[in-house]
Image (cartoon, rainbow, N blue to C red):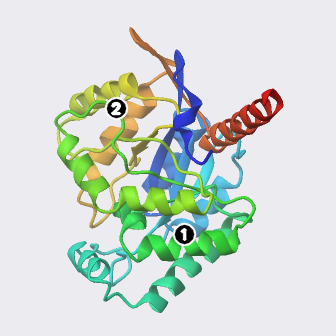
Amino acid sequence: MTEAIGLGAVAMQEICICADDFGLGAGVNTAVVDLAERGKISATSGMVRRSAWVDGARMLRRIAPEQLEVGLHLDLTRPSQGDGAEPGLAGLLLQTYTRTVFVEGLRSDVCDQLTRFEDAMGCAPAFIDGHRHVHQFPVVREVLVEEISRRYPTSPPWLRSTEPGGPLRREGLKARMIHALGGSTLQQQARSRGIPCSRGLLGVYDFDGDAGAYRSRLDYWLRTARTGDVLMCHPSAAPFAADPHANARLQEYEELGAIDFPWHSGTGSVRPVTLTRLLRAGLAMSKQRGISTRSAS
């Protein structure tokens, strides 16, 4: 079994709450470490080519992997200078969808980011996702899946699925658009190589509204979450230059910090867990079912 879908529905939903963009700035790093130590999140994905990554990685290594999984946030739209504004996504989309992107340059970039992660953390990433969901783009996904298979043949990191999680509502159009950029094909290619994937993706919105609006969204995502889903978030304890979502990050940090887990609603409960443990449990269950079937035949 290579997906969390087979884990089944239970009253206590166990999900990955992942803080993206670790390494982007000191405020992001501070928020992530604080939320992890308080049990509000269960994963973070690091941007290894950004200025705050190396110092931040030292902080992450002090947190037990059973408490916080650390993955690679594949970053292909870096600023041309330092911590400046990021370029638009249109150029990369055009190059990948027309397959005119320089493949060897892309492969070198992917390998370099994996190596930087390993050097800083002393281990392979627990999972891989993409800044602005670039890990699912054409060419990028083929290069990434191939490199995962070559580099980690026996214990590959899981990949983030962009399949929309939970019932779709106002943000459903954006969630569907993100998934349409290559999510289904990525899952198929990963499955063919035995690379596990998460279930659904929650946390998609336009970074608009006040703190109350984010809390309402957060309650909705938790209420509709299923075991194996990933709820992505982007908290920061302080704003930083050239960040178009600075206010939203501050609000996310405040609201995530205010939630108590397990979180309860009228329809069930939710708690953050490391997804690797769930995937391994699902694989063990799948193998056991296979043994039982063969014994009965």
* Residue at the image position 44 percent from the left and 51 percent from the top: 161
Residue topped by disc 2? 166
Q: Secondary structure at mark 2?
A: loop
Residue 117 rendering spot, x and y as whole percentages: 62, 69
Question: What type is the residue that disc 2 sits on?
Answer: Gly
| Marks 1 & 2, CB-CB < 8 Å contact | no
Task: Give me the residue at 34% from left, 75% from top.
Answer: 77
For badge 1, the amino acid type reads Val
Name the mark on residue 19: none
Q: Nearer the viewer, residue 11 or 291?
A: 291
Question: Seen from this angle, which residue lies furthest front?
Answer: 297
Write down the residue under mark 1. Answer: 145
Quarter of the image with the C terminus in it:
top right
Rendering quarter of residue 89: bottom left
Q: Residue at x 42, y 33 (%)?
A: 256
Q: Is residue 78 visible?
A: yes
Mark 1 neighbour density, 10 Å: few (under 14) some (14–19) many (20 or more): many
Sequence-first disc among 1 and 2: 1
Residue drawn at the location 34% of the way across and 24% of the way down: 219
* Res 22 visible: no
**SS for dot 1:** helix
Q: Residue placed farthest to the right in the image?
A: 295
Marker count (numbered): 2
